[in-house]
Amino acid sequence: MIAFACILAATGPLAAWWLWRRGAAITRAVVGLLALAYLLGVWAVLIEPQTLSVREVAVESPAWRGAPVRIGVLSDVHVGPDHMPPDRVRRIVTRLNRERPDVIVFLGDYVGGHAPAAQRSEPDRAEVMKGVAALGEARAPLGRYAVLGNHDWWFGGLLVEAALTRAGAPVLENRAVRIDRPGGSFWIAGLADMESARASPSAAAALREIPDGEPAIVLTHWPDTFPGIPDRIALTLAGHSHCGQVNLPFVGRPVLPSPGSARWPCGVYREGERQLYVTGGVGTSILPVRFRAPPEIVIVTLSAAP
């Protein structure tokens, strides 16, 4: 599709100029509308998906203890030929490193496409593995941690998990790890993906080892799991939504991938004492387009409420 879009981008202006020179007023009006649609299409297919925003988010939580922590968030990479070859993953990780986060979390969907690994060519499988391996270049003093997404399980969850482990980003599936630091220890817990072939997402299992009163963050691919997160969690981080991938003026986001994504499409949400941040991620899925939903890496600064 990208190659077809490039051909249209090259030939469209010539066709519009030819019609404009030979048309009546109504023809010129139609040509003008088509030209606008053409420009927006070029932006959505060829330009915006290649951009990268760095979003700074500040969250204050009554459940947080100790010094603030800067969390680098990267989600929905979708390695593949449409906008996300391994070299671009490497550039995105380099940009994330420049922000010097204390800890880095990966929120799933590292694989592009829907086909399982067994149905893909060897070069395609190798490309995916190179893209996941590039995440190993992320640097943070408190480490890197990951959860899996639905695309990863469609491809082969165990393959992706093994690649992340080699890259130094252990997968947290319904379990938690304690992070020790001078400013006060905290926990990071991860939920199983809703499409996992191994386990269903369980906040109870993930938080079982975390003592009451100790600060904790939950990682999940789907925002749909947020209702099951208890008040004692300082922040839940999720992806999956792509911020709708297309956000039309006056219309909004016509397509969102799940009920939770429709309820919490992107940004910070607070319900009672519970807080959620949903990132739009960096890749594309189904169609290689983004419109008013630019790729983003996020630095969340989590601190105690005054």
Image (cartoon, rainbow, N blue to C red):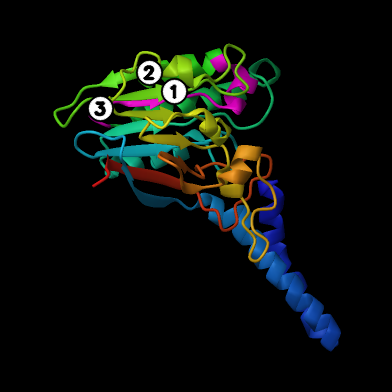
- Viewer-proximal residue, 11 or 268? 268
* Magenta-colored stretch includes residue 89: no
* Residue at the outermost front position: 272
Let me know if residue 174 appears in the view. Answer: no
Please determine whether, in this image, residue 51 is positioned above or below residue 176: below
- Residue holding disc 1: 190
> Quarter of the image holding residue 44?
bottom right
- Viewer-proximal residue, 172 or 131? 172
**N-term-proximal mark, 2 vs 1:** 2
- Residue holding disc 2: 176
The answer to whether the residue labelled 2 contacts the one labelled 1, judged by CB atoms less than 8 Å apart, is: yes
Mark 2 or 3, closer to the camera: 2
- Residue holding disc 3: 142
Coordinates of residue 137 in the picture (x, y in percent): 34, 30
* Residue at the outermost left position: 182
Distance from Cα at disc 3 to Cα at disc 1: 16 Å
Q: Label 2 crowding class (10 Å Cα cut-off): few <14, some 14-19, many 20+?
A: many
- The magenta stretch spans which residues? 140-157
- Viewer-proximal residue, 92 or 109? 109
Let me know if residue 99 appears in the view. Answer: yes
**N-term-proximal mark, 3 vs 1:** 3
**N-term-proximal mark, 2 vs 3:** 3
Kindly identify the amino acid type of the residue bearing the numbered disc 3. Answer: Leu
Q: Secondary structure at mark 3?
A: loop
Distance from Cα at disc 2 to Cα at disc 1: 6 Å
